[in-house]
Each structure stands twice: as C-alpha cells, then as structure tokens.
Amino acid sequence: GEVLKNRGAAITLPKVECTKDTSLCQEHQVHALPTIQLFHNGHLVPPNYRGPRTVNDLVHFAENAAVSKKKAEEAKVANKGKTRSDVGCSVSGHLLVHRVPGSVQFSVKSGEHNFNREHINFTHVVHHFSFNSVPESWEEMLAVMEDDSHRALVSKWYGRNFNSPKDHVVHEHYLKVVQTLTKPLGLSSEKQVYEHTISSHSYVSEQLAHVRFHYDLSPMQVVKEWKRRPFYEFITNLLALIGGTFTVMGIVNEAYNGVVAKARMGKLG
C-alpha cells in the first residue's frame, strides 16, 4: 500500500481475512488463498490476478488497473447474452504405467495458494478412460480417443456423471483390466485391446476432496478367434437333423396308429 501511495497510484489495497469474513469470501468465490481481485466502484473486474506476487509485479498490476477494467468491459460486451453453468477444467492426456496394480489421483495443489476445502467440489464427467498400447504421437492418441467403436469396446465411461452432493466428498473408481486378443476371419489383422470393468463409490472424508482411479491388470488374457466351419460338417449336421426329424415322426405315427387300432377294437379307456 505504501509503495502505491508513494507512486501516486489511484488505488487502495485492502485486505480481507477469509477465515473470519467467510460470507464475503464465499460471495466473491474465493476458493484459494491468497487471492487478489480488482474492484471498481464496488464491482469485480475479472479475471483474478494470477501473476507473480513480488512487489514490482503487484505494483505493475495496480498501475495498469484501468487497462484491465477496459479489457473486462470489452469481454462483457462480447459475451453479452451468453451464460455458462460449468465451472471447472477439462483434463486430457496419457500416462505411461507399468503392468502392475496402481492408481491415478486428481486433486488440487499449489505452491502459492492454500485452498478452502469447503469449496472444493470434484463433481466430474468421465468421457474416456482406457488402457492401450503406447501411442507414437499425440495425433494417434486423439484418434484412439475419438474412435467411437474402440471407445464403446474398451471405455464404459462415456458421459457418466459422478456428483458430489456434499462437502469433502472423495470419489474412488476401481478398474479390473483384462487384455483381450481378437483374431478375425480373412486377412484382417489381429487386434489387441484392454477391456475393463468398473466399480465406483463416493464417501465423505476429512481428507482434501479428490478423485482416484485404481487399476489392476489381470495376468489372464482372453482370446477371441473366429474360424470357418468346414462344409462337410454342415452336411453332416443337416443329415442328422433330417434323420432325427424322420425318427421322431415315425415314433409319433406309430403311437397314433396304436391308439387308433385300440379304439377300433373297443379297448380304449
């Protein structure tokens, strides 16, 4: 504050203790500490400051407050009439893992902030989660993720929504992964995929809210192989079906004739 005053900047630098003024911090969606926001005539000028927290950088940000305000007003005009209810992030990518049980965890962490655990909500939608051979490029990975037939086979997650109706909710997902080798007919090449089953549950915990995916790769392998049946086997089955039909018809006919003969002799019932 003294530096800004000495340099003649027309801006004040107040301080709010969120552990005491919790309602004010909730109103302005302060989820991490410290958070620096710019206000003009009592109205928030987005976005929040995300730069370094040195004196020189903060002074530079304050002295350029008018520029920030102008950009925010231009963005407001450009987005007028547009609303969005989704607040969060989108995560995509791939990890290299060993063929042993393990887990992948998504949480929040920062060397410059302390997070308000009451406001951390890990409601999430999983669009794709699968195990594949190591892709040679980012384009190859995207092709796998966007292949609907492949996704339907190996990733049962598409569009599944996992809500956090309370605070401090931890989501745990358990995946049992089985390697499957498919051998089609003809000249088509073999296809190797990793299918998995899913078991999920959520619970309230004193831990910082997070999402964890546990995976266990089975030592077993499933082989699906298609083979053509020889023509003579078809003929054999057909003749057996015809012979069986004639045999059954003969038994039925003999029983019917016996009943008719007894009826004519007056011996029936």
Image (cartoon, rainbow, N blue to C red):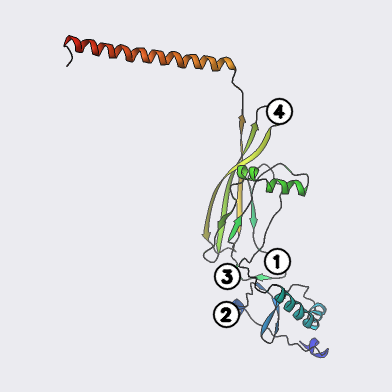
Residue 189 image offset from top left, x and y in percent: 71, 31
Residue 6, placed above or below residue 18: below
Q: Nearer the viewer, mark 2 or mark 1?
A: 2
Disc 3: which residue = 118
Q: Which residue is rendered at x = 26% and y = 11% of the image?
A: 258
Q: Which residue is rendered at x = 68% and y = 48% of the image?
A: 146
Q: Which disc, if any, is residue 169?
A: none
Q: Pointer 4 and pointer 1: residues touching (CB < 8 Å)?
A: no
Label 3 and label 1: CA atoms lie apart by: 17 Å
Label 2 and label 1: CA atoms lie apart by: 24 Å
Disc 4: which residue = 187
Residue type at the position of mark 1:
Ser
Residue type at the position of mark 2:
Ser
Give 28 or 59, whichever is nearer the viewer: 28
Q: Which disc, if any, is residue 110?
A: 1
Disc 2: which residue = 23
Residue type at the position of mark 3:
Glu
Tell which circle, 3 or 4, labels the residue nearer the N-terminal end. 3
